[in-house]
Amino acid sequence: MNGILYVLSTGCRWEDIPPERYGSGKTCWYRFTSWHREGRWAAMAGILLMELNRRRKINWQNAYLDASVRQNKKGVTIRLDTRDSRRKTA
């Protein structure tokens, strides 16, 4: 789990995981992909959200249900406006 979180937080490649600290990058990748296929990440996220809600640690007034993001051809990430595009701003 720590090896997976290391890759997700640093953005490094799986093969660049420090093996002396996290073990094999190949094993971490295999577990990450198998857990994704099995739906474990979605289940963990749901459990975490329920627990944070129970402890009143989430402000649902600031929650977003959807975010549209696309990648530019030059590698720049652009956030797309999900609001009604017909509405004009002053």
Image (spheres, rainbow, N blue to C red):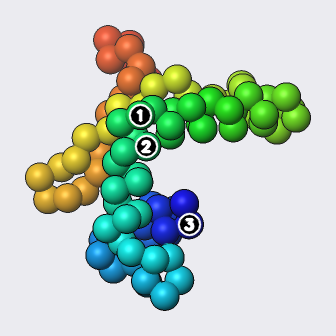
Mark 2 in CB contact with mark 1 (< 8 angstroms): yes
**Amino acid carrying mark 2 in the image:** Trp
Percent of width and height locating residue 49:
69, 33
Q: Quadrant of residue 52?
A: top right
Q: Secondary structure at mark 2?
A: helix
Disc on res. 2: 3
**Amino acid carrying mark 1 in the image:** Glu
Residue in the picture at 39% in, 75% down: 24
Residue under numbered circle 1: 38
Q: Kindly report the distance in space between the C-alpha atoms of the residues bearing marks 3 and 1.
A: 19 Å
Near mark 3 (Cα within 10 A), the count class, few <14, some 14-19 or many ≥20, is few
Percent of width and height locating residue 12:
35, 72
Vertical position of residue 25 compared to residue 35: above or below:
below
Residue closest to the far right: 55
Q: Kindly report the distance in space between the C-alpha atoms of the residues bearing marks 3 and 2.
A: 14 Å
Residue under numbered circle 2: 35
Name the side, left or right, on which 4 lies relative to 62: left
Q: Nearer the viewer, residue 58 or 77?
A: 58
Q: Nearer the viewer, residue 44 or 53?
A: 44
**Amino acid carrying mark 3 in the image:** Asn
Among the two numbered marks 3 and 2 on one chain, the one whose residue lies closer to the N terminus: 3
Residue in the picture at 35% in, 60% down: 29
Residue in the picture at 34% in, 48% down: 33
Residue in the picture at 41% in, 54% down: 31
Percent of width and height locating residue 57:
82, 38
Of the 4 image quadrants, the one containing the N terminus is bottom right
Does the image show residue 59? no
Mark 3 in CB contact with mark 1 (< 8 angstroms): no
Percent of width and height locating residue 19:
43, 83
